[in-house]
Image: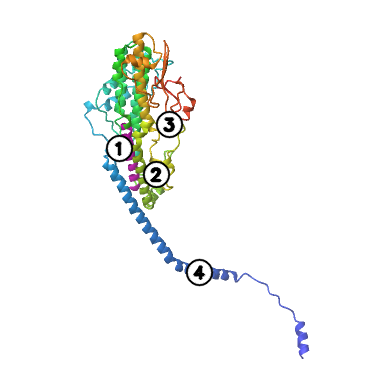
Amino acid sequence: MTHTTKAANEGAPTSVYFPTFAALPGRLRARRRAAWQRSKNAWRRSRRTLAVLLLLAIAAHIATNIWASVLLNRELAAVRSQGAPLTMSELALPPVPDERNAAPLYRRAYKHMKRPQVSGVWGERSQPSRKLLQEDQEAIALTRQAAMLPECRFNTDWDKGVFALFPHLAELRNLAQLMATQAVQESRDGQLELALRDIQVIFRMSGHGAEEQILIGVLVSRAIESIGYQALGAVLQTNQINPRQARQIAQQLPQRDWPAAIAKSLRGERAMGIWSYDALRSNRLNLGEMFNFFGDGGQPGPLARLTNRPLMLLWSPLLKLDEVYYLRIMSRHINALPAKIAKAPSRLVPDPDREIEQLPIYVVMTRSVMPVYSRVWVTAKEAEVERGLAQAALAIIAYRSATGEYPLHLSEAATLWGSTLPPDPYSGRPFGYRGDKDSFLLYSVGEDKKDDGGKWDQRAVVYPGTDDITWPPGQRK
């Protein structure tokens, strides 16, 4: 029976199994539930650790903020103890009565100019047009009147901080160019006294521009003074003056203390930098506005305004430390400015300020708001050079008036002049001089202290300070 049953089973049809995907969704759901459960268990195990880390981060942020606040308050107190301005409102000079204020007259004079963009036109190849100058006589008369007033207060909205505008500085410079053109034309017409009077007008305009407690004001003021020296050089080339006139002109040369003016302007720049930090913290200034992300004139969008405050909250300690670095660097450079000018360092290839390069990576604002002052000392040095060249030129011209020819050596002019001529501020030795009976070349060796014979070095286009400074200023040999 057993064998019969086995044979029967062997002859029966065999059933075949075909797999299906019916169970796949269930398996996937089971896997998701398992993964979720594992994540849940992991979160339960790590949330305490994350909470501790978050509390430590908050504590570190608070501690850093307190420490940074202490350092910042200490630096601000040091600046205040020196009597320097901390706010933009402190840069505004006290108002003066209109009868003593030259600013309204300068603005009126500029509006009456027929040619608002005036360039140097007193060179050998440029002959000023009497007709064009005649059209500007009202502007010239107003400028003369303004220059005689003792004070100059322009209406500047200092509350705008880094966005404050100074259009009057460009207007002053253009008026100075106009007065220089007028002086040269007067000298060519034989009106020497009028020409010298208008040159004095230019020098007084330079003093008015220097009243702005900001770096751009001092630089424009210095440019105006240089325009006056250029005009004086052109007038002396076209007129014969006697020794008495030469000494009178020498006594009237500007004696402005440019190192003090530059230091004062840098204190104003420091106050403007402080305004920038305060404006960021108070949300008056957006990060995009500060770093000029919107160069095409666009304004920060709603998202940028919305995210600015939380970003400032997180960045607050680092921003304070950033400001500490800014104040320290500014103070060091302001205090070292007189010594730097006196030593007249020679630097052929200008490089970025080392202190800025060595700042920590998080100090980003200092790099943005720090004024370009690495070569500001040159401004004061060039003013000293131009004044000395003018005095030496007057002595040379007085020598020719007395003897009929130019001296062969500068020492001969100094002997007849009756007093020691100022040395070259860069070299400490007498100015470079070459003269014959009919002409002379007078020059300073310049910042590189290398005597190039009064010739202009083409490297000066790329590397400032590599050329000699000749008389008249701006003249290249």
Question: Does 270 appear in magenta?
Answer: yes
Tell whether 352 sits left or right of 266: right
Residue 81 vertical placement versus 183 (above, below): below
Label 2: how many Cα within 10 Å (few below 14, some 14–19, many 20+): some
Q: Quadrant of the N terminus?
A: bottom right
Cβ–Cβ under 8 Å for marks 4 and 3: no
Residue 52 vertical placement versus 456 (above, below): below
Residue 10 lies, in percent from the top left, at 76, 82
Residue 216 lies, in percent from the top left, at 35, 32
Which of the two discs, 2 and 3, labels the residue nearer the N terminus? Answer: 3
Dominant SS type (magenta): helix
- Residue 135 or 167: which is nearer the viewer? 167
Tell whether 198 sits left or right of 27: left
Residue bearing mark 4? 38
User: What's under tag 1, amino acid-wise?
Assistant: Trp
Q: Nearer the viewer, mark 4 or mark 3?
A: 3
Q: CA distance from mark 2 to mark 4?
A: 46 Å
- Residue 329 or 154: which is nearer the viewer? 329
Residue span colored magenta: 260-282
Identify the coloring: rainbow
Which of the two discs, 1 and 4, labels the residue nearer the N terminus? Answer: 4
Answer with the quarter of the image where residue 258 lies.
Answer: top left
Cβ–Cβ under 8 Å for marks 2 and 3: no
Residue bearing mark 3? 346
